[in-house]
Amino acid sequence: MSGGFHNADFPMDDQGRTYHLMVKRGDVANRILTVGDTHRATALAKYLENVHKVEASRHFITYTGHYHGTPLTIVASLMGYPNTDFVVREFRAVTDGPLYFIRFGTCGTPDPNLRIGDLAVGRDAAGIIRNPDAFRAPQADPRAYYHITLPVPADQTLYNHMLAHLRANHPDVVPRIREGTALSGCSFFSSQGRPDSHFTDHNESMLTRITTEMPHTVSIEMETFHLYDLADVSVGHSVHAFGCAMIIAERSNKNFVTPAEKERLVTAWGIPLLDAIAAIPIPHEEEMHGPECC
Ligand code: URA
C-alpha cells in the first residue's frame, strides 16, 4: 500500500509511482501498444513472455514483457483525450530515450466504401471539439457548435516503418488497411454526430460536414488526435506516435460490429501490429537501459 503522493503538479509516491497509472521506472518499455479496453490488452498480453502487470484502481492496466525477445508494453489506455494524456505523460516520466506509441483502437467510419473489420490508419489526425460557448449564444453559423482543428501529421518515420512492415510481413491483411485522416471527437455522442433526443446537440449535419470538409477521413474515434498533438509538442520530439483503429461502426448505414467479429479482429490485427512494433529500430538501444529495465 502506498504511503501517499507528493507534488501536486506531477504526483508520485515514495517508490516513484505515478498517480493514475501507478507505474514506476522499469515498468514500461520504449515500444508501447495502447488499446482502448482491458479485455483487448489482456488478450494481447498473452503473446508476451516474462510479463509484469501493473493494475491501477482507475482500470489502467500496464503489461510489460518480451515479444519474441523484444521488450514491449501493452497498456489499456481506456478512452478519450484525458486518459490518453495520462498514459503519454506518466509513461514519459518513468522512462528514458525515445518512446514509440502505437495506438490500436476502435472507430467508426463516415466513408461508405469502408467496412467493419478494416483497419483505419491515421496519416494525420484532427480534433472535433464541442464549443460550449456557442450553445449559450445566438448563432447564425451552425459550424460554431463544433470546432474542427487543423490536422497534425503522424510521425513520418514511424508511419513508414509500420506500413512497410505490415506490407512485407502480412500481405494477407494489406487490402484491408485504409489510410487517411483520423478524426478524434471530444465525446462519443455529440461531437461524433450521433443524434440524441434527450439533448440539444446541434450535431445533425456533422457527418455531412466531415465528408465535405475532411473528405479523406477514414475514422472517427476519441484519442488519435491528442496522441499526435502531444507527440508533436514533446520536448526534443522524444515521443513518436502512430494511430490505427479497427472499424467497428459504419456510420453511413448504422451497422455495428458483432461481439464475435470484434473478438476475432483483436488478434487478426493485433498480432501483425505487435510484429511491426517489435521491429521498430531504436537508435542506441543497448546503451539506453540499465540492467534492471523491463
Ligand atoms: N469509437 C468511437 O469513438 N466511435 C465509434 O463510432 C466507434 C468506436
Image (spheres, grey):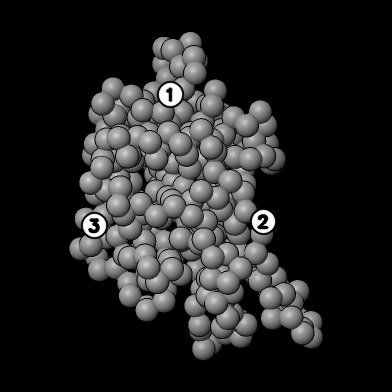
Is 134 situated left or right of 252 in this image?
A: right
Q: Position of residue 116 (x, y in %)?
A: 31, 65
Say whether disc 1 or disc 3 marks the residue closer to the N-terminus: 3
Q: Earlier in the sequence, mark 3 or mark 2?
A: 2
Q: Residue at x 41, y 16 (%)?
A: 292
| Residue with the mark numbered 3 | 263
Q: Residue at x 37, y 78 (%)?
A: 254
Could you tell me residue 114's position as x and y percent?
37, 65
Mark closer to the observer (1, 3): 1
Residue for point 48% across, 11% down? 287
**What is the three-letter code of the residue carrying label 2?**
Leu
Sort mark 3 into few (<14), some (14-19) or many (20+) by Cα contacts within 10 Å.
some
Tell me if residue 157 can be seen.
Answer: yes
Residue under pointer 1: 281
- Mark 2 lies on residue: 150
Closer to the N terminus: mark 1 or mark 2? Answer: 2
Query: Disc 1, ligand 1: is the CB inside 8 Å?
Result: no
SS for tag 3?
helix
Asked if the beta carbon under badge 2 is closer than 8 A to the nearest atom of ligand 1, the reply is no
Question: What percent of the width, then of the height, locates residue 53?
Answer: 35, 36
Report the residue that reaches farthest toward the bottom. 197
- In front: 63, or 263? 263
Label ID, residue 238: none
Q: CA distance from mark 3 to mark 2?
A: 34 Å
Residue 265 left/right relative to 200: left
Mark 1 is on which residue type?
Pro
| Within-10-Å neighbours for mark 1: few <14, some 14–19, many 20+ | few
Between the residue at mark 1 and the residue at mark 3, the CA separation in whole angstroms equals 30 Å
